[in-house]
Image (cartoon, helix red, strand yellow):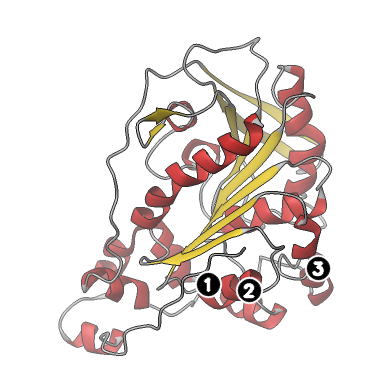
Amino acid sequence: MIDAKFSEPDPSLWSRRRLLRAGVGGAALLAVAGAAGFELISHGVLPGQQTLDQLDGACSVDRTPLAHSAVGASVSGTFYSTARRRIVAYSVGYPPGHGPGSALPLIVMLHGFGANHSDAMAGMNPTQAVALRVDGHQLAPMALVTVDGGGGYWNPHPDDDPMGMVVDELIPLCQRLGLGRSPQKIGTMGISMGGYGALLLAEKHPDLISAVAAISPAIWTSYSEAQSANAAAFDSDESFRRNDAIALAPRLKGIPVRVAAGDRDPFRPGVEALFGVLPVGSTARISRGCHTGPFFESQEPPSLSFLAKHLAD
């Protein structure tokens, strides 16, 4: 059953113009918004609205302080990606008590717009992520890899194919290390642009991906909507249709799916459209929050716990 919790926006929020009249200028807007807010403001998605929500408390979320066990080993490196036509960097985080040579399930963590392999997670690194204690319990052992995917929304472009890089280069590299190699499973996770990418990866490769968790996925309902927000996300209307996470959602049948977004997230219309077509049994939640770090951080522990449960089965 899809568990979707929707609420109507508060009409009493200040307008951006009113806030500017009160003396909060563009620099202050960006300072308050942070990296995630900058992405939305810079691409014209509800200019400044998210910052206003933060100022009036609409973006506040309840967060349990993160608790970690002693972290495991980490490995970072680079490789030349034929699919991306450039050198990319990656990092692998191992769970406590594990390191190179361990055979483990694998999470492929896809970063958001403007980020890279070094800051794909919100508020922690890969080794901290797989060392989390959620509700007092250590996650089942699994490794997590991050990689440089650029700003092309994880879908193929004529001169840059980050999805091909993940499937044909990154995952085989990890499997040579003993991670995600049968019978061990592979899951995928992402935030914002990475949340869209994680869904798309599972939709296009359901034989490879065993579970997916998307936090605040950056999903649009039409090519024109995507173009108006970020012209570089898709090369054409045809490209949008080939990589439409909403239209491809039926391919997720049989794959455990968790999607979470904030009620003040500018991508909420796309997320709600996705909820309407996710296979029965998917976990879909809209709760208090915005498209910002605090919400992302609040959703990482339950997302990792969800993946650990299904990858350990």
Q: Amino acid at mark 2?
A: Trp
Residue occupying image coordinates x 47% and y 26%: 127
Relative image position of residue 41 (x, y in whole percent): 43, 72
Read off the residue under disc 1: 267
- Residue at disc 3, secondary structure: helix
Q: Nearer the viewer, mark 2 or mark 3?
A: 2
Q: Which residue is mark 2?
A: 220
Which residue position holds label 3? 239
| Quarter of the image where the C terminus is located | top right
Q: Is residue 217 visible?
A: yes
Asked if 207 appears above or below 137 in the picture, the reply is: below
Question: Is residue 174 shown above or below 25?
Answer: above
Report x, y in % for residue 33: 33, 64
Q: Amino acid at mark 3?
A: Ser
Q: Residues within 10 Å of mark 3 (few under 14, many from 20)?
A: some
> Which quarter of the picture shows residue 107?
top right
Among numbered discs 3 and 1, the one appearing first in the sequence = 3
Q: CA distance from mark 2 to mark 3?
A: 13 Å
Give the answer, above or below, for where 35 lies relative to 267. above
Q: Give whichever of discs 1 and 2 has the lower sequence position.
A: 2
Instruction: From the viewer's side, name the closer residue of 198 and 51.
Output: 198
Q: How many marks?
A: 3
Secondary element at image label 2: loop
Query: Who's the residue at 19% across and 87% down the image?
Result: 21
Graded by Cα atoms within 10 Å as few (under 14), some (14 to 19) or many (20 or more), the crowding at tag 2 reads many
Q: Are marks 1 and 2 in contact (CB under 8 Å)?
A: yes
* Real-space CA distance between mark 1 and mark 2, rounded to the nearest whole angstrom: 7 Å
Give the alpha-carbon distance from disc 3 to disc 1, as whole Å. Answer: 20 Å
